[in-house]
Image: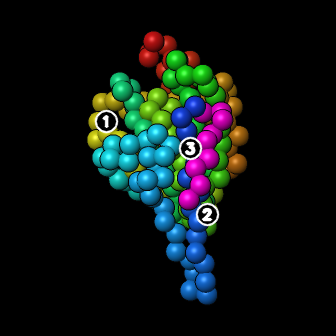
Amino acid sequence: MKVIPVPAIAGAYLFEPTPHADERGFFSRTFDADVVRSAGIDPNGFLQDSVSRSRRGVVRGMHLRSGEGEAKLVRCSWGAVFDVVVDLRPDSPTYLGKETFDLSGETQVSLYIPAGCAHGFQALTEYADVSYRIDRVHDASEDVAIAHDDPELAIPWPLPAALLSERDRRALPLSAVLQNTR
């Protein structure tokens, strides 16, 4: 498994597995505590695993947690997604940096997103399953949502947005979120 730093987001990493393929299909390790530890991340700090299934065009995000934030390790286990991370940590050397990723069940690449970064994705296939390994127990009172179509973010979503949640339809522009967190 390779660890690849994400230059646009300080502290973010891609974990690229080494699949073993044969006529049956493939086998791939998607999490290795020693490899995660080598990137400076405590593998024992993850407290919750979750999964979402989305239909083609669905956008989930841009989401983050207030307070201490929430670090997560995400992976598309089935289908494909266009994934986005925005660094909203004022003290970060990559503050307001943005990066996009293509995650898929074909590659099984995992993306580590540090606490304080906004995250979202759009399903590119008929269905896409995204698994999350999170370092905090969910607290809905800390949910923060930024409008996925905020012109300041200028995220190049590959498809028209479909089936937004009520939370995402009511999401604030980035400028309002930044003003509320100062």
Tell me: residue 59, above or below residue 68.
Answer: below
Q: Amino acid at mark 2?
A: Thr
Residue furthest bottom as drawn = 23
Q: Is residue 171 visible?
A: no
Could you tell me residue 107's position as x and y percent?
A: 61, 63
Could you tell me residue 172's position as x and y percent?
A: 50, 25
Residue under the image location 29 percent in, 36 percent down: 139
Q: Residues within 10 Å of mark 2 (few under 14, many from 20)?
A: some
Residue under the image location 41 percent in, 54 percent down: 33
Task: Using the numbered discs, state the Cα–Cα distance from disc 3 to disc 2 in whole angstroms.
Answer: 15 Å
Residue under the image location 51 percent in, 23 percent down: 89
Numbered range of the magenta stretch: 1-9
Could you tell me residue 173's position as x and y percent?
A: 55, 24
**Is 26 left, or right, of 50 in this rendering?**
right
Residue under the image location 40 percent in, 35 percent down: 70
Magenta segment includes 5? yes
Task: Give the position of the N terminus as an image quadrant.
Answer: bottom right
- Residue at the disc numbered 2: 107
Q: Any mark on residue 140, and which?
A: 1
- Residue at the disc numbered 3: 13
Residue 13: which quarter of the image?
A: top right
Nearer the viewer's eye, disc 1 or disc 3?
3
N-term mark: 3 or 2: 3
**Is 100 left, or right, of 11 in this rendering?**
right
Q: Count the marks: how many?
A: 3
Looking at the image, do the residues carrying marks 3 and 2 touch, with CB atoms under 8 Å apart? no
Task: Using the numbered discs, state the Cα–Cα distance from disc 1 to disc 3 in whole angstroms.
Answer: 26 Å
Q: Residues within 10 Å of mark 3 (few under 14, many from 20)?
A: many
